[in-house]
Amino acid sequence: MIDAHVALPQPFTYEALKAYIDVAVSKGLDGIVILEPTYKFRELKSMYREVCATYPYQKTWFQKVNTASLKEYQDFITEMRKKEFPIDVKFGLEACYFTQHESYIAGIKEAFDYDVFIGRIRFLDNIAFDWTKHSREMMWDKYNAGYLYRRYYEMMNAMLTSHLFDGIAGFDNIKLMNVKCPFKMDHTYHKMAMLLAKNHIYVEDDASIDYRFHHVDKGLSKAFLAMCEQQGVEVKRVSHARSAEEVGKFE
């Protein structure tokens, strides 16, 4: 078993990676996948121009997190690939998906030989939809829930047909604000599962939805997992670890 999504602290160092590997080995894992989000990297800040312009909260957040160097991450990957580890270690990026930036994202993907390149919707029409403190004010108190769910899965449809990604993170994270969808999701889940299978894209089942967000689903919804099984979609359980202690934290 592998932990298919962990993120390292900055700066990127062998010591930090070794701490993750040591925990993985202690838990009997066969491998880990380092996936760093694109919002971390200063070289990619133009992709977040609209996000920063939409709400002051988002600009403040971005200025706080946009501190790493993509070149340093790529150099780190190159150096770590020269080393031998007791488990399989892969490196990649988690790209924030924006329909208006597909060409830009394609350029990011093509510029370096990542092992894994996955996508995630963090912003719905440039607005963060799952921030506990601000998303209700920015979005949920302003727009009809049915519209927001439909718009979210329209973006998901676009992402799944973009031919950019190996996998998808945070598939149904729109649920994290605990605003119930006013319509049944069966048809939508079926369509999304079919697209995942057709385009050979895996989907993450994220344990941090349980231990970090304390959501009742503890990961992907049971209804969607059933659709994935029916369609033969590859589902990868991930910890989404942000520290060594969280590696392999699947429960």
Image (tube, rainbow, N blue to C red):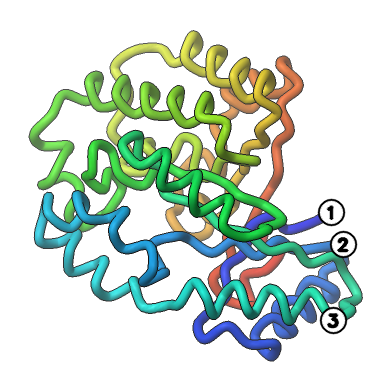
Query: Which is nearer the N-term, disc 1 or disc 2?
Result: 1
**Residue type highlighted by circle 3:** Lys
In the figure, 55 relative to 41: above or below? Answer: above
Q: Residue visible at 31% across and 63% down?
A: 45
Label 1 – label 3 distance at C-alpha: 21 Å
Placement of the C terminus among the 4 image quadrants: bottom right
The answer to whether residue 103 shows anywhere in this view is yes
Q: Residue visible at 27% across and 55% down?
A: 48
Q: Residue visible at 59% across and 28% down?
A: 222
In what element is the residue under mark 2?
loop
In the figure, 135 relative to 139: above or below? Answer: below
In the figure, 190 relative to 181: above or below? Answer: above
Tell me if mark 1 has few (under 14), some (14-19) or many (20+) residues whose alpha carbon lies within 10 angstroms of its own: few
**Number of marks in the rendered image:** 3
Residue extending furthest toward the bottom: 15
Query: Which residue corresponds to mark 1?
Result: 1
Label 1 – label 2 distance at C-alpha: 5 Å
Q: Image quadrant of residue 182?
A: top left
Q: Is residue 10 left or right of residue 144?
A: right
The answer to whether residue 251 shows anywhere in this view is no
Residue toward you, 147 or 93: 93
Label 2 – label 3 distance at C-alpha: 17 Å
Query: Which residue corresponds to mark 3?
Result: 83
> Do callouts 1 and 2 mark residues in contact (Cβ within 8 Å)?
yes
Residue toward you, 126 or 128: 126
Percent from the top left, x then y, of residue 188? 47, 15
Residue toward you, 37 or 233: 37
**Residue type highlighted by circle 2:** Asp
Q: Is residue 109 left or right of residue 139?
A: right
Query: Which residue corresponds to mark 2?
Result: 30
Query: Which is nearer the N-term, disc 1 or disc 3?
Result: 1
Front: mark 2 or 3? 3
